[in-house]
Amino acid sequence: MGATLMVVLGLVFTAPQWAKNWVWYGDPLYPVLHKHFAANPWTGDSENRFVWGFMEDQLWQPDKTWAGLWESIQVLLQFSFQPHDWPKFHGKVPVFGSLFTLLLFTLPFLKKTKRVWGLFLSVHLGVFIWYWTHHQDRYLQAVVPWMTAAAAAAILLVWRHGFAARAAVVGMVSLQVIWGGDVYFIPGHAMVGSPVKAVADLLSTGYRKDFAARDKTFAPFTDVGAALPKGAKLLVHEYHPHLGIAAASVNDYPVNQGGISYGELATPRAVYDKLKSYGVTHLLWVTSANKGADSLAGDLVFYHFALKVGVGAKVYGSMTLAAMPEKPPPEGELGGALALTCGKGLPAGLYHLADLHVPAYGPEKNKYPKPFMTVGPDVTEEDLLTRASYVVIESRCKKALPAKQASFFRAAPKHGGYELMVRRKGVAKID
């Protein structure tokens, strides 16, 4: 009866999350149960992105084998000395938990530790579940208060054992303070680098009389927000931070949404219809390069739309802002994509755009087919350019197009090691 009541209460108290998902997305744990429910929105690329771009790439887990179980058990004594996190955060430097782990070995020598043992065991159960499911250090913060309480209780019990014990624990805590004294200064914040420096720079604006900097804390997004008309809805293309735009937004980062696949949409008209269905009025993208999170076809389709169909493009810092057109672009097929490459990975030649719609994640990652046309005795590179709406240049081994040929194309943001070019509006071919 008690267990049943706990399950019922758990479902009731979590209903705002799973019931909302079920109503809006057709999957109470959207997108986790997409194979069992009719998840919506969902594209032909969504499963690959979710499984390989999120679950396999970002959810760190041991193998669900005896070896994985043993690995998870060993971590109970190692987690505070072997960090588990992205290099851009705190790299190979452990940042918490060491006192908790070391004080565990004092418990057998202490008295009246029944409840303290219970607390230590509860923390270790949490550590095991953390490692078995998703072991990045930041997700272990939920049990840090328990670690603190357990460590404090153990220190108090040790303190009662006389001068020698007190000297030992003071030395241990002192070494921890010295060892971890630089943690607060690690430039590991994903957005601002060093939080301490960011705060110091902000607080010093008064002394430096740089009052304008206080209003640009979230630049260039505050500038973008100021340029948006009232009621605008902004598509933030493949970029997470956007605090300051002061407007509703849509984010199309491939791994974190299931509704947009530019490679499947294929044409500017299809992109227009899809974005309009989400109420998008403006587009924002990083001007110089992207993270290669979408397929080559997806990037080419989006930048074709943004650069040729987008209205009034203007650069704000590292970002470019453009408005959606008032009327949809005409229907029509697009030309091919000419790959000028080193020959490995993406073979050189002319492709149908659909052939570049290759997953960016998983076993099929970057496994491109052969082009349908290549340079040969009767076919020159210039011949292929006349058929191409796009050019993909592998910059490590291929030079940029000659000025005459390049004038027919417009540079788009880079895709990894590839420079992308989109044919300019109104140009049919190179003479």
Image (cartoon, rainbow, N blue to C red):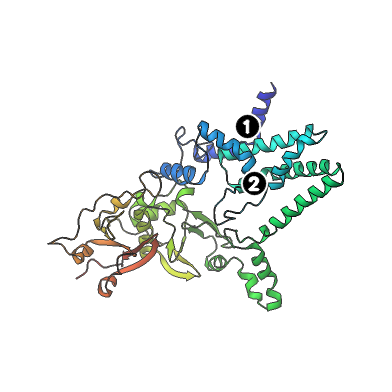
Q: Position of residue 284 (x, y in %)?
A: 47, 62
Q: Earlier in the sequence, mark 2 or mark 1?
A: 1
* Number of numbered markers: 2
Crowd class of label 1 (few under 14; some 14 to 19; many from 20; radius 10 Å)? some
Residue 221 in the image: above or below residue 75? below
Measuring 24% from the left and 51% from the top, which residue is drawn there? Answer: 370
According to the image, label 1 marks what residue?
11
Kindly identify the residue that appears in the image at 74 percent across and 42 percent down: 103
Residue 88 x/y as whole percent:
55, 57
**Residue 16 visible in this rendered orientation of the protein:** no
313 relative to 91 in the view: left or right: left
* Circles 2 and 1: CB atoms closer than 8 Å: no
Residue 28 picture quarter: top right
Marks 2 and 1, how far apart in space?
34 Å
Q: Label 2: which residue?
A: 80
Q: Amino acid at mark 1?
A: Leu
- In the rendered structure, the answer to whether residue 376 lies left or right of residue 216 reads left
Image coordinates of residue 230 in percent, x first then y, are 55, 63
Given residues 378 and 284, the one toward you in this image is 378
Give SS at disc 1.
helix
Q: Residue furthest bottom?
A: 209
The residue type indicated by label 2 comes to Ser
Query: Disc 2 on helix, strand or loop?
Result: loop
Quadrant of the image for the C terminus? bottom left
Q: Which mark is residue 427?
A: none
Residue at 56%, 38% in the rendered image: 133
Q: Is residue 380 visible?
A: yes
